[in-house]
Amino acid sequence: MKLDTAMSEINRESIRAMRLSYGEAGLDEGEIANDPIAHFIKWLGEAAENIMVVEANAMVLSTISGNQPVSRTVLLKDVSTAGFTFFTNYLSRKAESINKNPKVSLLFPWYPMERQVIILGSAEKISSEESESYFESRPWSSQIGAIASAQSSKLESRAELEEKFASAAAKFPEGTKVARPDYWGGYIVRPISIEFWQGRYSRLHDRLRYELEPTSAAPHDSNWQVTRLNP
Ligand SMILES: Cc1cc2nc3c(=O)[nH]c(=O)nc-3n(C[C@H](O)[C@H](O)[C@H](O)COP(=O)(O)O)c2cc1C
């Protein structure tokens, strides 16, 4: 669609007028019982069951590249008291950023549920055994795709990518074991802050931020301090 056609359908005035009235369902400190990971898992389950939410496990990962924040979507593939795991290419732009500065942010945008969760923490590579185990569980075409894509680097053409896919597929035909490339694996984000946002009436939204106590001996157990914030 050409830009001027698009703008006749959606113009600045209509963007400004976009406004939903948020509901009555609130978020209460008691409900979370000082266990933000357990509460996150409860919300993730509710998002997964809600047909309005597409890809409930999709999260916006922001990294810092020099002095420039960069965001992109990745899929959450595991969550536990230890942290939040996703898989990617270890030579990608995001990996390069994480190597230099492991501090990241994760954002779950569950708009149909009037909910958002923002996690701050540090990313680190998971063990190659864990990456191997997840790689093996992926469909064959995704495994071949991981080999074929030198993620974030320049392609001369679409054909170049298709050729790389075909050559990896010839090397590892469907039904055979596909060797995981060592440049593909997982990161775990160990959280230091988890903020839950629940939309409420009159823009009086609920915001509860859980932060790990800095002195915490076992940081990933349950030493969380809660603060209620202005919306
Ligand atoms: C819904 C969705 C899910 C995605 N999931 C992943 C993922 O799990 N891992 C990944 O590396 N890229 C995923 N991507 C692609 C990334 O957003 C991004 O384009 C890619 O990782 C390259 O990012 P980078 O160049 O900043 O490293 C996903 C994109 C979308 C829209």
Image (spheres, rainbow, N blue to C red):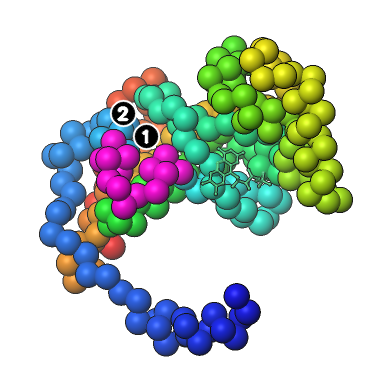
Residue at image location 50% in from the left, 48% down from the top: 60
Earlier-in-chain disc, 1 versus 2:
1
Report the number of discs: 2
To which residue does mark 1 refer?
212
In the image, 213 versus 104, the foreground residue is 104
Of residues 135 and 218, the one nearer the viewer is 135
Dot 1 falls on a residue whose secondary structure is: strand
- Say whether marks 1 and 2 touch (CB < 8 Å): yes
Q: Quadrant of the N terminus?
A: bottom right
Q: Is residue 171 above or below residue 191?
A: above
> Does the magenta run of residues contain 116?
no
The magenta span reads 45-58
Give residue 223's quadrant in the image. top left
Q: Quadrant of residue 83?
A: top left
> Is residue 47 inside the magenta stretch?
yes
Q: Which residue is mark 2?
A: 223
Amino acid found under the numbered disc labelled 2: Asn
Residue 176 drawn at (x, y percent): 67, 13
Measured as percent of width and height from the top left, residue 72 is found at 58, 50
Crowding at label 2, few (<14), some or many (≥20) Cα neighbours within 10 Å?
some
Locate residue 59 relative to residue 98 in the image: left or right.
left
